[in-house]
Amino acid sequence: MKSSQPKKEKTREILNSFTSEESSLIPMLQACQKHFGYLPRVVMEEISSYLDMPLSNVYGVTTFYAQFRLEPLGDHLVKVCHGTACHVRGADKINELLENELGIKSGETTPDGTFTLERVACLGCCSLAPVIMVDETAHGNLDRDKVKAVVEKYRGDDK
Amino acid sequence: MNTKVLIGYASCGIAAGAGEVDRALRSRIAKRSLDIEITKVGCVGMCHNEPIIEIHDPNGVYVYGDVEVSDVDEIVESHLVEGVPVEEKLISSPEESYDYFDVQEKIVLRNSGVIDPEDIGDYIDSGGYEALKKVLTEMSPQEVIDEIKNSNLRGRGGAGFPTGLKWQFAANAPGDEKYIICNADEGDPGAFMDRSILEGDPHAVLEGMIIGAYAIGASDSYIYCRAEYPLALKRLDIGIEQAKEKGFLGENILGTDFSFDIHIKEGAGAFVCGEETALMHSIEGERGMPRPRPPFPAQKGLFGKPTNINNVETWANIPWIIRNGAEEYASIGTERSGGTKVFALAGKIKRGGLVEVPIGTPLREIIYNVGGGIDEDLEFKAVQLGGPSGGCLPAEYLDTPVDYETLTEAGAIMGSGGMIVMDECDCMVNVARYFLDFTQKESCGKCTFCRVGTKRMLEILDKFTHGSGTLEDIESIKNLASNIKAYSLCGLGQTAPNPVLTTLRYFEHEYYDHLQEQTCSAGVCRELITFTITDACVGCTRCASECPTEAITGERGEQHVIDQEYCIKCGACHDVCPVNAVEVD
Ligand SMILES: Cc1cc2nc3c(=O)[nH]c(=O)nc-3n(C[C@H](O)[C@H](O)[C@H](O)COP(=O)(O)O)c2cc1C
Ligand code: SF4
Ligand code: FES
């Protein structure tokens, strides 16, 4: 097992730019997740000692919010919009197609670590429904062929 | 007048490909060494036509829609070099203007799609920060509050509380440290008004907040914005920096002794955090769970201090009201509610996008005159307003004016402005189930009826969509609904049954079809439908190659057949068939 020391040190470094007040907790978690891609236990332990707050409290806040994850992400995060507009325009079908194409269920990461598939509620481009977002780029007006093309494009990127 | 080019660069435009179009446009203009400025602007509202390019030349304004990279060269060569507009790609020109804006009245969206949201100079040139100057030099805080009261402005975040009155409470509250909050959590899944306002005209919101702070006596504030809106967050950041440089924000604003600061807090993905007390807990670093009111935020809000919280759109109205006067604002809209409301029109509509209309405009005008009617000319079935707290209204209610009271009487709510149109292919039981699934997952868990009651209700709705519902189940739903409403602390639980209750009220027959006939006439509920291939099939083999379970067989050029035993009713064949030979029953 790899040592958690480097993660610990990096976390310290990130935390040092925050005041040790309770109201910094969520921004701290956000900053750490931005860096590590997820929130490993050591990060929460560091925050707990930095804020002098029980670990259970840090964990409780972390798991309350959908944004925070406890598992590492794949190279590309595919968010499938399940907002109302996308729902009536076939978001479930898009989701199913992506699950088939990637061979994983929503919430999972492909074994090769390329893609993580996630369900989200509304990406704010409802007039272009159905919409998915890969990393920071939204793709709208999707049909089956377009979804496949998007997946291929990102698959190709890593070759 | 110099020719200038605007390109729609909000999230909607970017999702439709504005980035590539912008690059192509810049490179072509550079190649031809044209001295033309290209400005990236926010959303003009016509999201259905994105990417959009607007050319302002001496003859007027020309709008190109659905622009593809391959169209760019022709537009540059023909229009910008030779002065001949490319007719086929035009959606609006001085000769033939687009009727999308005919019923609309722009107050909140006055600058969106017109100015560069990342340049405070553009905002100032269009009259921005004039209202702040007026307030600081000519008006007392109480005069500002009175002005807002007289404007009849009501909160745009959903509940419609009179804004001036709310400000009065916060101003009257004892204490010299007070906060202001801008609620930009926009949780309704299927709504994007606030995102567009923040992306298109961030300074209008900032100016509104500064004016509000002066009126209330607040010195500090937060904008709580969804993390899913990276572009809005970025533009707010830029806006705050620029406002500080210009002296509109920070210490001694415009040389007066009034000081005020604005911070941004990124939300972390919890719908319930849009509720004001939960939102404040979240800023304080806690789990975003609502608490009982009173005490109201105006008495005891953020960090225990008097706090005034308003929605993005509410704030964006303020500068306009100060500049044009309360009377002018109140003259738009209805007697009980002044001004306009922005709606995010989406779903099965021909022209979806952002729409701003006077309060009191009938639904029909919004859906048909602005939205152009139902996509593919199918039959209108329902319009959903207010998201998970709202309801679905049937065709008989199309002449209902959109205002707080009338919509509530009809069983829907004005909500924050999400308006999703549904057609004959949408199953109302499925839609009710969809919203309940959402609220059930988003319940913070504090109240038993909200936490467990919604779960039980969802299980019953599942029975309906599976065709195993019973008559008693309908009674159980009604009972659960009244208990959930009565015994929930916050608006999330109190309104969670609404989508179910309105569909039961207006579309009860669909529930009965599901339980007595075991049919889903819209063809949505999988357990109740069958896919078959008719003799219209041309044997192209597309469906067979698309079917994930290989349930479809047939030779090329011959009619294909679905083996019902293997069919999982995913509908892929139906979606790819080029000749519509796949039927749903
Ligand atoms: C579950 C729930 C979610 C809410 N979400 C939002 C939201 O996303 N944006 C918003 O402005 N108000 C939201 N509200 C309403 C706020 O609690 C509050 O009333 C509003 O921000 C007040 O601003 P206004 O008076 O300008 O409308 C929500 C309320 C509830 C109960
Ligand atoms: S009604 Fe639901 S969301 Fe609101 S406080 Fe109670 S459990 Fe939480
Ligand atoms: S519903 Fe999918 S982007 Fe809004």
Image (tube, helix red, strand yellow):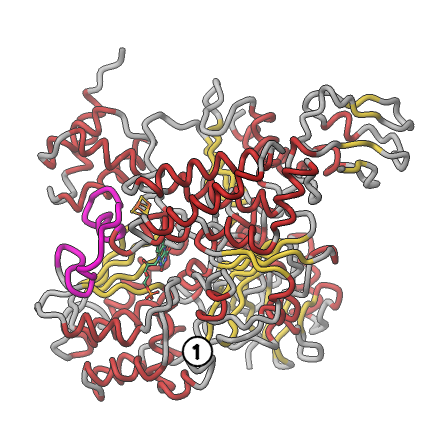
Percent of width and height locating residue B538: 89, 34
Question: Can residue A7 be seen in the rendering of this structure?
Answer: yes
| Residue A56 on image: x %, y % | 18, 29
Q: Amino acid at mark 1?
A: Gly
Q: Is residue B51 visible?
A: no
Q: Is residue B215 left or right of residue B400?
A: left
Quarter of the rendering occupied by the N terminus of chain A = top left
- The part of the image, by quadrant, that contains residue A40 is top left
Which chain letter matches label 1? B
The residue drawn where x is 21% and y is 23% is A6
Magenta residues? B278-304
The residue lying toward the viewer, choosing from A107 and A17, is A107
The residue closer to the viewer here, B258 or B476, is B476
Residue at 14 percent of width and 55 percent of height:
B303
- Which residue in the structure is indicated by mark 1? B339
Q: Is residue B89 above or below residue B133?
A: above
Secondary structure mostly seen in the magenta stretch = loop
